[in-house]
Amino acid sequence: MNTLRRSVSLIALVAVAACSKKQPPAPAPAPAPAPAPRVNQDSIDRANAAKAAAAAEAERQRLAAATAAEASRLDAARTAARAKLGMVIYFDYDKDEIREDQRVTLDAKVPILNANPDVKMRIAGHTDDRGSDEYNLALGQRRAAAVRRYMAARGVADGRFEVVSFGEQRPASPGESEDAWAKNRRAEFEITGGGTALKVP
């Protein structure tokens, strides 16, 4: 009986001891989330508007530069076309036939004239100073007329050309040498109408 009491007492003591042990603390509650930062929509809108304005200005400058470059290219092309139209051709002594080596100069004028049907030109025939004034005036006229026929054969209406002769009166190179005479036997070209805004073929 004593043994039984002791056992019961021992069990009771163990149970009391077990109950008297500290329980682990309950977990701490999770901290409350931080409040969301306050959004200033006006500042965001201003920043977005500034970005859009900067992008639009960059595009405007790019387009302006491209337009200026194209205008410069077109201006250079028009200057080159005008120079081709004004290129002089040369003749052999006492001849009015178009020399083979001068045809490329005349052929370069054809596409420009075809692209600009309003352009009109004066062809002036010149000679060196050998021969009489009358003979040289007639030779200069034949040279200018030969150029007009050459151009007409390539589709440029001969009515677009005025032909004149200055004979020996307007030398390009003074002097009594073969080099000077060769420079004076020529046909010169001048735009007389429709050349203000040449179209470049």
Image (cartoon, grey):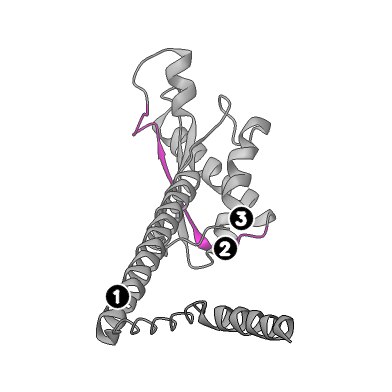
Front position among marks 1 and 3:
1
Q: CA distance from mark 2 to mark 1?
A: 52 Å
For the N terminus, give its image quadrant.
Answer: bottom right
CB of mark 1 within 8 Å of CB of mark 3?
no
Q: Which residues are magenta?
A: 155-172
Q: Secondary structure at mark 1?
A: helix
Residue bearing mark 1: 47
SS at badge 3:
helix
**In the displayed structure, does residue 157 sit left or right of residue 137?**
right
- Crowding near the residue tagged with mark 2, few <14, some 14–19, many ≥20 C-alpha atoms within 10 Å: few
Q: Which residue in the structure is indicated by mark 2?
A: 115
Residue topped by disc 3:
111
The count of marks equals 3
The image position of residue 74, as x and y in percent, is 45, 56
Q: Amino acid at mark 3?
A: Pro
> How far is the residue under mark 1 from the one under mark 3?
55 Å
Q: Is residue 79 left or right of residue 160?
A: left
Q: Do tag 3 and tag 2 residues touch (Cβ < 8 Å)? A: yes
The quadrant of the picture occupied by the C terminus is: bottom right
